[in-house]
Amino acid sequence: MDKITMKRLYGITLIIMGICGFLLAVSELCGRFLPDIAVRIIGIADIVCLPIFIILFVIERRK
């Protein structure tokens, strides 16, 4: 995997995790709770992005 692709994937996963965290935090602070299914979908998106983020982080740090 070339360096540009790794950096793009790294950035995309970071953005997705940030958006998910932001959505959950704003819904809690505003008092308008998201439906249970929406919270689960956001959580699954976070769980899918986290291993990709960790793998790319380790590969980048080893070089």
Image (cartoon, grey):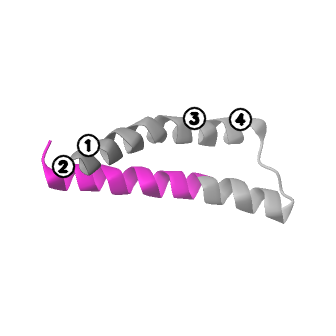
Residue occupied by mark 2: 63
Q: Is residue 27 above or below residue 51?
A: below
Secondary element type, mark 2: loop
CA neighbours of label 4 inside 10 A, class few (<14), some (14 to 19), many (20+): few
Q: Which label's residue is closer to the chain start, 4 or 1?
A: 4
Distance from the alpha carbon under mark 3 to that under mark 4: 10 Å
Q: Which residue is mark 3?
A: 44
* Res. 59 mark: 1
Q: Secondary structure at mark 1?
A: helix
Q: Quadrant of residue 44?
A: top right
Q: Is residue 59 above or below residue 23?
A: above
Task: Give the CA separation, mark 2 to mark 4.
Answer: 40 Å
Q: Quadrant of the N terminus?
A: top left
Q: Nearer the viewer, residue 11 or 33?
A: 11
Question: Which tag is nearer the camera, tag 3 or tag 4?
Answer: 3
Q: Position of residue 26 (x, y in %)?
A: 73, 62
